[in-house]
Amino acid sequence: METMTENKSENKKRVFSAIKPTGNPTLGNYLGAMQYWGGMSDEYDCIFSVADLHAITVAIEPKDLRENSKRLFALLIAVGIDPEKNVVFMQSHVRAHSELCWLLNNYTMFGEARRMTQFKEKSEKAPENINVGLFDYPVLMAADILLYQTDIVPVGEDQLQHVELCRNIAERFNNRYSPTFKMPEGKVPKAGARIYSLTDPTAKMGKSDSGDAGAVFILDTPETIMRKFKRAVTDSDAAVKASPDKPGITNLLNIYAALCGITVAAAEAEFDGCDYATFKTRVGEAAVERLRPVREKYDALRRDDGRLSELMRAGADTAARIAARTLEKVYKKIGFVRT
Ligand code: TYM
């Protein structure tokens, strides 16, 4: 396992992505990102992480951070990321992430970080906790990506701006010294790149909306999933067609397309003449069927904490070795004395 990913073959491109353990992972996380990750290891050299260091930029209780982190690690494996074929690890287990973040801070402009949409949104949501970590968040994310000489970053649409910032930082550093970092590219899926809330289809479906009927969680029971879909808001006119003035139906069509791996046009054709209630039930059923095996695998993994810890350690060992090479290069280029 280690040799395969560590000694990355020259012709296989590297993929890196991560997800942070705040709140409860949603169908949005799954359709926009996680569902693709498991299938990438044949073509790419893949590294996936639970971004726990990112999770403390918003207020979180220690017990929640612990539970969310374990849950997400198990869930990454449950959605299909085979730890024998991929590197899967907890971000905080590899110290190079924090170290490179500090170094990159000095090549990131205040003005460019201030422009990040997510920083602005989160600041508005929690004006009492606009901490420096929240501001620095995209720089840590750049460190995550750049440490592994990443070619491709598979993410949902909301993360593209951060990947763009990462590219700017990499370019600035490479120009200031000499080529050090690979230039990564963000990649969003055709369907599912932005899934909206089922109750407010103008707002993103988010992990922290626990208790909100608008978010479907990957680990929701089939009954809960069905209930949430049946109550999803629709629009006044009755045709199942995507259009800008029908955000509810458009979102459901997009969800169905992403679940079934088809285009929105194909989904529209499938539901031509269908009434809203039947349509919502069919989308709910597709989600239930898709998530059922994930939930079963997840339950099995959570029965063995010892095994989970072993997998975390193995993943972190491999990741740390790869990351150390880049970090050492960076220290040297800047002019730090190394012994
Ligand atoms: P996070 O944890 O918010 O989300 C994880 C992934 O899920 C995608 N996503 C969505 N896609 C479609 N519709 C939605 N409603 C939706 N909500 C979330 C996100 O785009 C993301 O791909 N900063 C990152 C985690 C991170 C990271 C990285 C990602 C840390 N370091 C390095 C890539 C590379 C985040 O908070 O994602």
Image (spheres, rainbow, N blue to C red):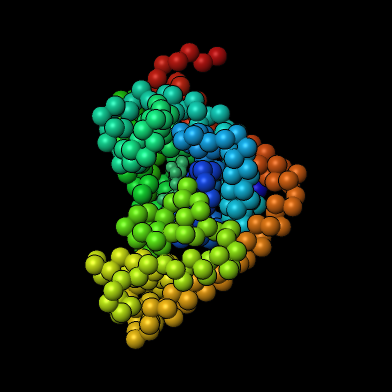
Instruction: Using the image as rendered, state which of residue 97 and residue 15 is in the foreground.
Output: 97
Q: Quadrant of residue 79?
A: bottom right
Q: Is residue 54 left or right of residue 263?
A: right
Pick the residue in front: 63 or 3. 63
Q: Is residue 52 visible?
A: yes
Instruction: Relative to 260, say whether 158 is above or below.
Output: above
Return the residue found at the far left.
245
Q: How many marks?
A: 0
Q: Residue at x 73, y 46 (%)?
A: 305
Residue 1 image position (x, y, % from top left)? 65, 48
Give how far across and how far down residue 247 sits, in percent: 30, 65
**On screen, residue 32 above or below 131:** below
162 on left or right of 46: left
Question: For the C terminus, which image quadrant?
Answer: top right
Rendered image quadrant of residue 191: bottom left
- x and y, in percent, of residue 274 in the image: 38, 84
Q: Measured from the top left, where is residue 130 in percent x and y?
A: 38, 30
Residue 114 vertical position relative to residue 223 in the rendered view, above or below: above
| Depth check, front residue: 318 or 123 | 123
> Given the current orientation, which residue lies at the most extreme bottom position?
273
**Residue 3 visible somewhere in the drawing:** no
Q: Residue at x 41, y 62 (%)?
A: 198
Q: Quadrant of residue 93?
A: top right
User: Measuring 51% from the left and 53% from the top, which residue is drawn there?
Assistant: 211
Residue beneath the point at 52% across and 57% down: 217
